[in-house]
Amino acid sequence: MQCEAPNSQSAKVDVRPVTTRGDLRRFITLPRHIYKGMDGFVPPLDMEQRHLLSPKESPVFRHAEIQYFLAWCDGRPVGRIAAIVDHKAIDHWQEVIGQFGALDAIPEREIVSALLQAVEDWLKKRQISKIRGPVTLSGNAETGTMVEGQHSAPMIAIPWHPKGLDALIRQCGYEKAQDLLSYRLELDGTTEERFKVPGNLRLGEGRLSTITTRNLSKKEITTQGEVLRKLYNDAWSHKYNFVPMQDYEMTAMIEQIKPLLRPEHYVQIDQNGEPVAMAMVLPNLYDIAGDLGGAPSPLGWMRLGYRLATHRFRSARVILLGVSSKMRGTMLGSLLPSLAIVELMRRGHTLPYKWVELGWVLESDVGMRNLAESLVPHPHKTHRLYEKNLSA
């Protein structure tokens, strides 16, 4: 089923490429305007969205061709989308696949159809016959369309979309490729008791005497970031939709999240001094910024600064969890994710978090799902990736 051309009733929908600074500003801030008042939506900070989307700030533009589009109706923007040719992704996948991303729209068929058609036409002109998405603007950043969880508490770097957008995408001929699951883990004092590691093994003791851990050091964060990048790329290289993170992407990410980080947020597990596993949590920016709107007033910025300085967070997200490929299939390799989570929970006693979100877990990743569901039976959010073969 192809995306249908707008009918006479929807002829007002006009999709145009973003070419001016004004259009770029509209593109970046559009979600908080079109979703305003929708039940469950909390606007992200414009500053955060600029890091993701501005060609001057997003490192993805160094290795990808990207074209933004805005959908207009009666003189106002009603939707946005990005067309993406990520050359690092194509090199890794060994398959020429274009992508769409940053899809946000008033959930009406004519708008969504016109936006997707614009991307498909742009990709076809570049001889690309398969499309996947959404990603913003890479699989290493915001990924997927929210299918379930619109009324759950918002979480940093997790996109929000209204109910119905999933159905509209599928009506345009896109098929579900993979779901990404997020689990809410309450830290109520019983979590560690419920989370049993076989034999009550502890890092650095007994059979794990050759295993040591490292904290995050802000003085060494650049060096540690490179170790983290290499370990992350190695651990996730075989996963669906994975794109290797480049050194300049890690540098940009560290600069963005450094003000949020504390030593307890990162655990690196070494075996005989060699990194073999890692886990990182990131405080939930919505806890301190969710009530300030996307563009805070001067007083709002002062409040945000105070809340950040005093670490007024209530929740956090596990953004990285992985094990070296050389440990894959071994008994120790199967235990390392559990040991990393236990270590993070132990350190978390000094932090004010009431709950953490484990996500995104690939629907097909049975090992990670079993780990998450040993603590939380069911996901509280679901995001979806789609694929479609484009006709010549």
Image (spheres, helix red, strand yellow):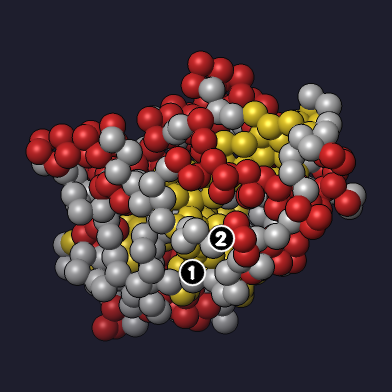
Q: Give residue 268's position: percent from left, percent from top.
A: 66, 34
In this view, the residue in front, 134 or 247, is: 247
Tag shown at residue 134: none
- Secondary element under disc 2, as helix, strand or loop, is helix
Give the labeled residue for mark 1. Answer: 381
Disc 2 marks which amino acid? Thr
Q: Which residue is drawn at 26% across and 73% down?
A: 39
- Secondary element under disc 1, as helix, strand or loop, is strand
Is residue 334 shown above or below 64? below
Q: Give residue 223's position: percent from left, percent from top.
A: 61, 19
Q: Going by the image, does 301 lie left or right of 218?
A: left
- Please give the count of numbered marks on the rendered protein: 2
In this view, the residue in front, 261 or 24, is: 261
In this view, the residue in front, 123 or 94, is: 94
Quadrant of res 75: bottom left
Q: Going by the image, does 194 lie left or right of 6?
A: right
Quadrant of res 174: bottom right
Give the labeled residue for mark 2. Answer: 191
| Label 2 environment density (alpha carbons within 10 Å; few <14, some 14–19, many ≥20) | some
Quadrant of res 104: bottom left
Quadrant location of the C terminus? Answer: bottom right
Q: Residue at x 76, y 35 (%)?
A: 204
